[in-house]
Amino acid sequence: MHNFFTAHVTREIQLEDQARLQRFAEAWRYYYGEHPDVIRVEHGKRNPNVKPNYARLIVDASVSHLFGTKDLGFEIVGKTQREGNERTREEQWLDEVMEHNDKMVFYHRLGTNGSVCGHAFYKIVLEGDVLPRLCVLDPGTVKVHTDPHDLTRVVRYEVEYSGKDPSSGQARDYRQVIEQNGAGWKITEQEKGPDAPEWTTTATPPWAYPFPPIDGCQNLPSPNEFWGVADLEMDKIHLNRAINFQASNISKIIEVHGHPKTWTNGYMPGMKIDTSTDQLILLPGEGELHNLEMVGDLGSHIEYLRWVLQALHETARIPEVATGKVDNIGQLSGLALQILYGPIKELTGTKQLTYGGLIKRLHQRLLVIGRFGDGYRTTLHWPEIVPTDVTTELQAALLKQEVGFSKDTTITELGGDPEKERQKRQEEAEEAADQLIPNPLDGLGGGKQQQNQEEE
């Protein structure tokens, strides 16, 4: 009985893993625009299928609003000595490591994996004395084993993928097993041929840190399982498929009725009908000649297409205005923008919690590897989500000062650092004062020449 139960649970886990990988593959196909035909294509005829790729739009818009295109700044709070506005040694080292790994590209690749698959992973690779490398892992190659009492605590990672042996040119399967070993972690690298039954251990690289070289996070929180929720779940894929179907139907209707069929009655065998534009058509008796016309119009089809598209934007929490569509909107106030961007603002705020925790843990681990010690905390400076009107913001800041808000508060709300601005204003005032002090030798004939002679 015990063996039967164990085998059943093992089988259920295997089926769950297979279903997840199939879901990943389907999401990637839609992301890359490899949508299936929804209307049958007749042999030798034009393919009427229309496949707008809203799946990629959803993912790219979500990632761009999370990380932005400029630098995602950070600073260490506490446990460090800062002189003025200079970056600390720890911050400078982290800046160097992140730039070495193309920081913003790394973040976008991480976010795209998470948005498509629901989970994002990276791996730290140490190669001698050079700076650590950060590798973004394909979630489809990662298998995790969690503590049975705590699904958020991973005790074993398996990264498995196929590739070509650079020496022989033959296909090989590769696996890296990273498992908890007492207070540390053990790394085992293995290989095998495509038909080989067993793995062969090729290396056991050292890892001298209390944390694993792999870390990850949920894209959006899923409370009762390890894997997170993707932006491109099956409901969005089905809506994209419905959009493709309706757009393809409209395309087919336009194709048929844009070049209508001609029909006639009273046609006599052997009769030739010349339909040239400069010819008079004569039909015998009560003969008729017509074009096959569409019953109704495309209005209902187009309206349904718009409804499905709206449903996709609403369920994805990516409003059309956030993708650059501003038709019939006009001038918008700050409050109107806040309302329109509300869904993506909430979505991005949740992602800042999940990805923010991942990035902060990465900073902590890199500082340990860099021999700065542990216990550091970093603050991230996320990009603005909602477009702002600078004039309106400045007017609001002045009104706040009139009712009692301090300048420091309004400067902070506008994205500035009150202390830095105070120092800059002092430097500007000193520079202006120096320019106002007259040179006592100015206006005296030969004064400058006399001064030069005295210096010589």
Image: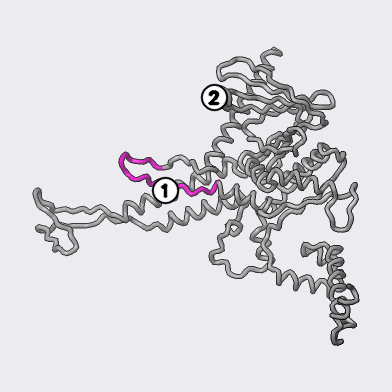
The percent position of residue 84, horizontal first and vertical second, equals 88, 58
Using the rendered view, name the quadrant where residue 156 is placed. Answer: top right
Q: Pointer 1: residues within 10 angstroms few (<14), some, or many (20+)?
A: many
As for residue 265 lying within the magenta part, the answer is no
Q: Give SS at disc 2.
A: loop
> Which of the marked residues, 1 or 2, is nearer the chain's N terminus?
2
Numbered disc in front, either 1 or 2: 2
Determine the main secondary structure of the stretch shown in magenta.
loop
The C terminus lies in quadrant: bottom right
Q: What colouring does the structure picture have?
A: one colour
Instruction: Please indicate whether residue 446 sits to the left or right of residue 337 in the image.
Output: right
Q: In terms of depth relative to the viewer, which is nearer, 201 or 413?
A: 201
* Residue sitting at x 50%, y 55%: 306
Q: Does residue 56 lie above or below 125 as drawn?
A: below
- Cα gap from disc 1 to disc 2, whole angstroms: 44 Å
- Residue indicated by mark 2: 169
As for residue 49 lying within the magenta part, the answer is yes
- Residue indicated by mark 1: 248
Does the rendering let one see residue 315? Answer: no
Instruction: Please indicate whether residue 122 sits to the left or right of residue 417 in the image.
Output: left
Q: In terms of depth relative to the viewer, which is nearer, 341 or 117?
A: 117
* Residue sitting at x 56%, y 50%: 57
Q: Could you tell me the amino acid type at mark 2?
A: Gly
The percent position of residue 326, horizontal first and vertical second, equals 56, 63
Q: Which residues are magenta?
A: 39-55
Q: Does residue 203 lie above or below 333 as drawn?
A: above
The percent position of residue 338, horizontal first and vertical second, equals 68, 62
Does the rendering let one see residue 181? Answer: yes
